[in-house]
Image (spheres, helix red, strand yellow):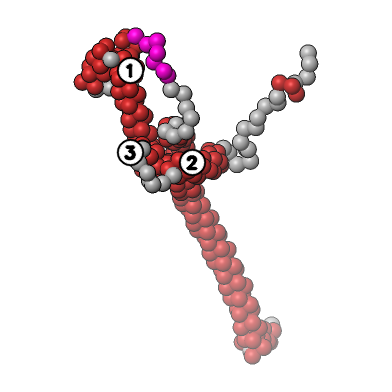
């Protein structure tokens, strides 16, 4: 019995036993270390995932907020631009409409200063009729009084004085009409494109030249060797007409939407089908 105990004690305290115990201790420690490391890694991994998810959500929220703010800024700017464009387009329509009317009126006024035209004879006019003519011609009070007095004393001389005044008024109206068109062009130029503005100024220059020719012709009437002002007047009018045609085309191009052409003439009466 004692020998068995001695053998067991020798086995437990011997080198092999020590090696065995050492291996078991190392393996147990390694397993414990592996489990601890695995647990730490899983915990760290979980923590990283939570932090990453939190950061992702935070970044996502910040991006969405910034995007919303940027969209609102862009929307506000677009609304301002659209309103500005709408107001500008409306103003441009108004300016173009009035400008072409002023230019066409000036063309008619200056064009009628020379050449054949209608002129009343005043043969059957009464003093009341003459007074209306003077009022329509915006005659000053003294001019009206003196002309009516002369008509009452000498009808023939009174009519000559009336015709001379009407001629002066007509020439003055031509100058005023050209000046109105030019002044309007200068005042409203900010709403006019460069092409339209350049053509309008050229038309004004040509109409001004036509007016000068007619005015000089009137002042030098009866003089010899003063030049052919009728030809100068006609040439300037032709130039003005050409500029006005191009001007109206440029205005249509500015005002009509892209792809929409100018209005076309409708069918003639003879082309309509019979009913």
User: What residue is pinned by disc 1?
Assistant: 156
Which residue lies at the image location 58% right of the left edge and 75% below the top edge? 29
Q: Nearer the viewer, mark 2 or mark 1?
A: 1
How far is disc 3 from disc 2 in space, using C-alphas? Answer: 18 Å
Query: Is 167 on the left-hand or right-hand side of 20?
Result: left
The quarter holding residue 191 reads: top left
Q: Which mark is residue 219?
A: 3
Query: Is 269 on the left-hand or right-hand side of 44?
Result: right
State the SS at label 3.
helix
Q: Nearer the viewer, mark 3 or mark 2?
A: 3
User: What residue is pinned by disc 2?
Assistant: 234
Q: Decide which of tag 3 and tag 2 comes sooner along the chain.
A: 3
Query: Is 264 on the left-hand or right-hand side of 37?
Result: right
Q: Residue 272: give x, y in percent of width and height.
A: 75, 21
Instruction: Compare residues 128 and 42 and report the one nearer the observer.
Output: 128
State the SS at label 2.
helix
State the SS at label 1.
helix
Say if mark 1 contacts mark 3, CB within 8 Å: no
Magenta-colored span:
120-126
Which residue lies at the image location 49% right of the left edge and 52% below the top edge? 63
Say if mark 3 contacts mark 2, CB within 8 Å: no
Q: Decide which of tag 1 and tag 3 comes sooner along the chain.
A: 1
Question: Magenta stretch containing residue 207, yes or no?
Answer: no
Q: Residue 202: give x, y in percent of width and height.
A: 45, 46
How far is disc 1 from disc 3 in space, using C-alphas? Answer: 23 Å
Callout 1 crowding tier (Cα within 10 Å): few <14, some 14–19, many ≥20? some
Q: Nearer the viewer, mark 1 or mark 3?
A: 1
Q: Decide which of tag 2 and tag 1 comes sooner along the chain.
A: 1
Which residue lies at the image location 62% right of the left edge and 32% below the top edge? 263
Q: Residue 64: give x, y in percent of width and height.
A: 50, 48
Q: Give the answer, above or below, for where 199 lies relative to 174.
A: below
Q: Residue 94: give x, y in percent of width and height.
A: 44, 33
């Amino acid at each position: 019995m004692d020998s068995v105990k001695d053998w067991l004690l020798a086995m437990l305290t011997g080198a092999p036993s020590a090696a065995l115990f050492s291996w078991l201790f190392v393996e147990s420690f390694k397993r414990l270390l592996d489990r601890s490391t695995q647990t730490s890694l899983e915990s760290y991994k979980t923590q990283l995932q939570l932090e990453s998810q939190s950061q992702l959500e935070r970044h996502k929220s910040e991006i969405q907020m910034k995007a919303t703010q940027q969209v609102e800024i862009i929307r506000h700017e677009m609304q301002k631009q659209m309103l500005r464009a709408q107001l500008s387009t409306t103003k441009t329509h108004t300016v173009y409409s009035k400008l072409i009317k002023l230019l066409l009126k000036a063309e008619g006024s200056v064009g009628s200063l020379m050449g054949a035209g209608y002129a009343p004879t005043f043969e059957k006019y009464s003093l009341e009729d003459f007074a209306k003519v003077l009022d329509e011609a915006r005659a000053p009070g003294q001019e009206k009084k003196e002309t009516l007095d002369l008509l009452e004393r000498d009808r023939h001389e009174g009519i000559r004085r009336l015709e001379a005044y009407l001629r002066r008024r007509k020439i003055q109206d031509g100058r005023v009409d050209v000046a109105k068109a030019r002044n309007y062009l200068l005042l409203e130029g900010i709403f006019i494109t460069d092409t339209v503005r350049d053509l309008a100024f050229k038309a004004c220059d040509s109409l001004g030249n036509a007016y000068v020719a007619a005015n000089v012709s009137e002042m030098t009437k009866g003089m010899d060797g003063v030049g052919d002002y009728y030809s100068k007047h006609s040439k300037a009018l032709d130039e003005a007409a050409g500029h006005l045609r191009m001007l109206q085309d440029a205005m249509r191009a500015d005002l009509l939407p892209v792809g929409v052409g100018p209005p076309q003439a409708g069918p003639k009466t003879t082309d309509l089908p019979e009913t």
